[in-house]
């Protein structure tokens, strides 16, 4: 049996270098001549998307479907958060452009859309609760049937898994819900 070039001792010795340049070290791990692998976690980092808006208004949100992250800025620009998200499962389900938050609800109920029922006839109305696909909180956009909401199924975050909505961990949507006023401008890219 051949000995692995990566031993426990060499790994521990390399840890200081990883803390100095984690991006470079991780980039090396993923390099190959093969086609890129579809990752399930977003390229999660702070980005300044504020230039997508003339001004921040009451507050501003950019939902980046490529990096699978939601960016929030308060109206004064002092508060910034970035959250990992689930995004629409396909380009056909993805609506991009400008919209705004028109309504918010704690404990939302869920009714499948006609197109959802067409894809899965077993889908039925769900009251608030642990099986509800909208999680604990929902913020409704002015696009019909599009929401930013929580999810009880944490496996969905970081994946293309929704029917058009932007999903967050329940803890994250509760935090976002508390600081996001109705009228917040949203851009989905």
Image (cartoon, rainbow, N blue to C red):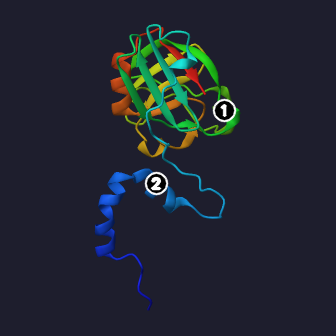
Q: CA–CA distance between discs 1 and 2?
A: 35 Å
Q: Give the structural element (helix, strand or loop) at label 2.
A: helix
Q: Looking at the picture, does residue 180 appear above or below residue 92? A: above
Q: Please say if 72 is above or below 39.
A: above
Tag 1 secondary structure:
helix
| The C terminus lies in quadrant | top right
The reply, left or right, for residue 54 in relation to residue 4 is right
Q: Is residue 170 above or below residue 181?
A: below
Find residue 93 and name its label.
1
Residue shown at the point (48%, 26%) measured from the top left: 48
Q: Residue, x 64% and y 39% (percent of image)?
A: 120
Q: Which residue is mark 2?
A: 24
Residue at 44% x, 51% y: name it.
23
Counting other residues with Cα less than 10 Å from the Cα at mark 2, is it few (<14), some (14-19), or many (20 or more)?
few
Tell us which disc is closer to us: 1 or 2.
2
**As rendered, which of 98 and 177 lies closer to the eye?**
98
Whether residue 130 is visible, yes or no, is yes
Q: Is residue 28 left or right of residue 38?
A: left
Quadrant of res 169: top left
């Amino acid at each position: 049996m051949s000995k692995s070039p990566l031993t426990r001792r060499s790994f521990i010795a390399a840890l200081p270098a990883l803390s100095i340049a984690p991006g470079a070290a991780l980039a090396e791990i993923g390099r190959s001549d093969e086609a890129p692998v579809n990752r399930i976690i977003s390229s999660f980092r702070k980005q300044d998307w504020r230039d997508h808006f003339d001004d921040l208004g009451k507050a501003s949100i950019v939902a980046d479907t490529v990096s699978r992250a939601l960016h929030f800025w308060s109206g004064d620009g002092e508060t910034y958060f970035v959250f990992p998200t689930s995004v629409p499962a396909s380009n056909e389900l993805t609506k991009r452009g400008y919209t705004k938050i028109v309504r918010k609800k704690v404990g939302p109920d869920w009714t499948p859309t006609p197109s959802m029922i067409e894809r899965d006839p077993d889908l039925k109305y769900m009251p608030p609760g642990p099986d509800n696909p909208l999680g604990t909180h929902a913020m409704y956009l002015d696009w019909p049937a599009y929401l930013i909401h929580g999810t009880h199924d944490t496996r969905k975050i970081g994946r293309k898994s929704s029917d058009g909505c932007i999903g967050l961990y329940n803890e994250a949507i509760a935090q976002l819900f508390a600081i996001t006023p109705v009228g917040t401008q949203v851009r989905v890219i």
